[in-house]
Image (cartoon, helix red, strand yellow):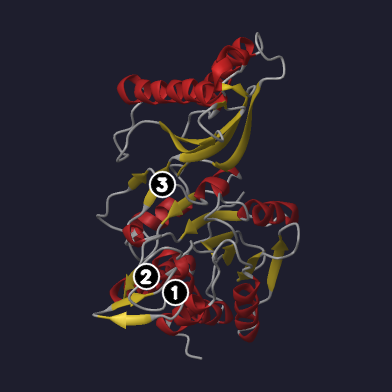
Amino acid sequence: MSNEPESLLATLVAFDTTSRHSNLSLIEWVRQHLAGLGISSQLTYNDDGSKANLFALVGPVAQPALILSGHSDVVPVDGQSWSSDPFVLSERDGRLYGRGAADMKGFIACVLAWLPSVLAAHAEGRLQQQIGLALSYDEEVGCLGVPRLIADLLARGIPVSGCIIGEPTRMQPVVAHKGIAHFRCRVTGRSAHSSLTPQGVNAIEYAARLISHIRKLADTEAHFGRARPLYDVPYATLQTGTIHGGTVPNIVPRECEFVFECRWLPGEPLARYIDTVRDYAATLVEEMRRTAPEADITFEQLVDCQPFESPQGSSLLDYIHELCPGRSHQAVAYTTEAGCFSAAGFPSVVLGPGSIEQAHRPDEYIERTQLQECMVWLDGLREIVCRSAGGGK
């Protein structure tokens, strides 16, 4: 098969790697593709072995690695109206349509198409540092896979000079983003016939009070919180996304469950927001237990994706400045695996082909011109790496 990025993208899109499915078919294909180039891969698996991360290295072993990273999973197409099969890459008017074309198999295809030129530079003795390829699982459901990949890198003592996460940014560098955390809150009261309401503890009503408290926290942040003008939404946000509770109208509901999220800025602890919610919940529990000693409110964290900010003075930012002259550096409210790499001490930047506006949508597409621009950018990166040895951690 051709190494052109469009051909590789067609192959990658054909793997249905929706997060609820295994990604092993795609990972094994990439592993064999790399083996055909003479590149070995290391896999790290989830608990039941149904999913895996992949990591591969090219270049002089003694030098730190510059990692190019992408996630292999995609979001579902359920309930979306597509004009063509979402798992068959199709072209219309210079746009390549398919689930994951922009988010983010387009970047992975470009890196795979680029690696033979990196191998050639290494064979010529020109490569001054290692190039790493990292593919993760379950990014779309909370960055669940990449921490195991990172833990493996740290355990193996692989020095890393930086990480480029190829999320779709239209090749504009993103140097900071917020973190995101999801919490499931379960409120347990006491059921009773609705004619005997005082004998019960209404879980929905207490959940509503807690949700109202979260809303007040969000409003306080919007009006008085720390603001960072670099962001499109320059302050921390909180919101409730789902709620379930009750059975029938004439029974005081014993249980209610809701999920809320917090998106917070780099340099701030998540605990600043969540501890306030827990403290208010504790006062509600005290009140509930005056009627029902068994009443309770519990929290379970479902998602923990850290914020990140590219450190000034890193060799990675020097590369970005050289390769993206005149392009403004952005900060965004959405979250990527850059937070995980950054938390491990790896300088990170988010930059890749395609538009985030296409992510998760029906008829998701990436322009051919974006793939071409990414290939030119990667060629420039290769030449910089051929004359520069980045510092590592």
The reply to whether residue 265 is visible in this rendering is no
Q: Are marks 1 and 2 in contact (CB under 8 Å)?
A: yes
Counting every numbered tag in the picture gives 3
**Residue to which mark 1 is pinned:** 110
Q: Residues within 10 Å of mark 2 (few under 14, many from 20)?
A: many
Q: Which callout, 1 or 3, points at the residue further toward the start of the chain? A: 1
Task: Identify the residue at horizontal 58%, vertical 64% (top origin).
Answer: 134
Q: Which callout, 1 or 2, points at the residue further toward the start of the chain? A: 1
* Residue 216 tag number: none
Q: What residue type is labelled 3?
A: Tyr
Residue 33 at x, y percent in the picture: 60, 82
In which quadrant of the rendered view does residue 356 lie? bottom left
Q: What residue type is labelled 2?
A: Cys
**Residue to which mark 2 is pinned:** 374
Residue 186 at x, y percent in the picture: 61, 31
The reply to whether residue 295 is visible in this rendering is yes
**Residue to which mark 3 is pinned:** 334
SS at mark 3? loop
User: Which callout, 3 or 2, points to the residue nearer the camera?
Assistant: 3
Q: What residue type is labelled 1?
A: Cys
Label 1 to label 2: alpha-carbon separation: 7 Å
Q: Which callout, 3 or 2, points at the residue further toward the start of the chain? A: 3
Label 3 to label 2: alpha-carbon separation: 22 Å
Q: How crowded is mark 3: few (under 14 residues within 10 Å), some or many (20 or more)?
A: few
SS at mark 2? helix
SS at mark 1? helix
Of residue 272 and residue 127, the one placed in the foreground of this image is 272
